Amino acid sequence: GGAGGVSGELVAAPIKLPLLPGRQPTTFWAYNGSVPGPLIEAYEGDTVEIAFTNRLAQPTTIHWHGMPVPAEQDGNPHDPVPPGASRHYRFTLPKGSAGTYWYHPHPHGYTGQQAYMGLAGTFIVRRRDDPLAHLPEQLLVLSDLKLDGDGSIAANSMADHHDGREGQFVLVNGALRPTLALAEGERQRWRLWNATSARILKIALPAHEVHLVGTDGGAIASPRRIEHLLLSPGERAELVVTGRFGAGQTPGLVALPYARGKAMHPEQDTVLPLMTLNRHGRRTSAPLPARLAEVPALPAPAVKRRVEFSENMADPKAMFLINGKTYDMARIDFEGKVGQVEEWEIVGNAHMDHPFHLHGTQFQVLARTEDGQWRDEPFLAWHDVVNVAAGESVRLRFRQDLPGLRMFHCHILEHEDQGMMGQLLVR
Ligand code: C2O
Ligand code: CU
Ligand code: CU
């Protein structure tokens, strides 16, 4: 990412990768032959040009998840790239867009399958005055893999369609329980992506010192010490991890138990180890900067809307609903205006958690309910995914700075594919 631009080529194609020793290689679908796909890095102000070719047997798109790109460049379900075809994606990253993003397919009905077959990649937008630029950076993509007995990627079961697909292997950068070196007292900046279809990961680093420094859409105002972090499907976070081994080894990066209201699969009720940390010497590190960014509160809204998530198990063709409806590409659910602040209340009138996601912009979560009482969020941050737990309501604000048709949906990809999605037309 130099002065002005980033350009490259992405090709989506099947590829065989050896996975289990002594077995047949596993067929993935990958961007440029790698799972996860190649990292794209740019600076605020850069223009990004990607020449894309679809060598899959299905239509696909590339969606630039979380990024403020024009609607017609955002790879939404209205712009499929047919098998064998190519297209060019082009967009300019505005000031203020620095953050941790990703790209993945978004053809209606096939997003889940294409993502679990391996199509997803990371995208980082940097700012030139990044106060954490001096720290060593680790990029950690959390995904999961569901394999059949023969080592091939398993199809979805009925239970996966309902609860969302969870693989039996939770991977970090495509590897099972990899190891990372960290010195006592060393500070590292970690960017984490939850690239799973449906797992809600309550991540923690027992013993070590962890500060949250950024969310989906970039830096928060100042570092915040945290004990754990709920990262729902599609969500990202930036942490500063300071090595604190004390006398011995620590559990490393883990996912703590979390119940998300699954009906057909057991809940995660044990601590799941994700990555081992190996103590590697001792280091002294400079203190964290007290200020990271300005996160100004969005002004009072011009429009308020209610978005209700619900489930209807009686109708297998429309089980997951938004405001009582299943997705219809020809229906506009809401009309908004460029530059106008909207306040949405997302109501989880459901038995399961459903992570809410909106295209084209970042939002601020203002408050959420706890036992029916509204509670203000302790600080403002830029998000494009927020978990809405069963029975919970979440209040958020955003502004769309570009016109066009934008989707909002549950980011459990099986729910999205089954129609838990709506459309906002911004004029
Ligand atoms: Cu990450 Cu509409 O998707
Ligand atoms: Cu998205
Ligand atoms: Cu859902």
Image (tube, rainbow, N blue to C red):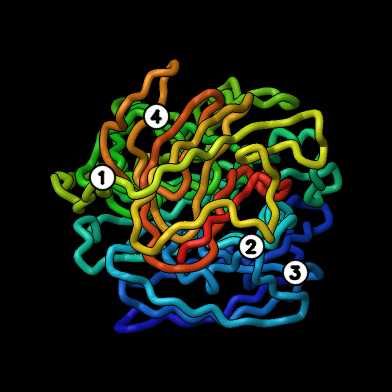
Q: Could you tell me how far apart the alpha carbons at marks 3 and 1 are, in whole angstroms? A: 46 Å
- Residue 260 percent location from the top left of the image: 59, 27
Q: Name the amino acid, label 2.
A: Pro
Q: Amino acid at mark 1?
A: Glu
Q: Dot 2 lies on which element?
A: loop
Specify the label residue 59 is tagged with.
Answer: 3
- Please give the name of the residue rendered at 57% of the width and 64% of the height, measured from the top-left corner: 63
Compute the Cα span from label 2 to label 1.
37 Å
Amino acid type, callout 3:
Pro
The residue singled out by tag 1 in the image is 186
Q: Nearer the viewer, mark 2 or mark 1?
A: 2
Q: Is residue 168 visible?
A: no
- Left or right relative to 230: residue 331: right
Comparing 395 with 14, the one in front is 395
At x 33%, y 25%, the residue is 375
Residue occupied by mark 2: 105
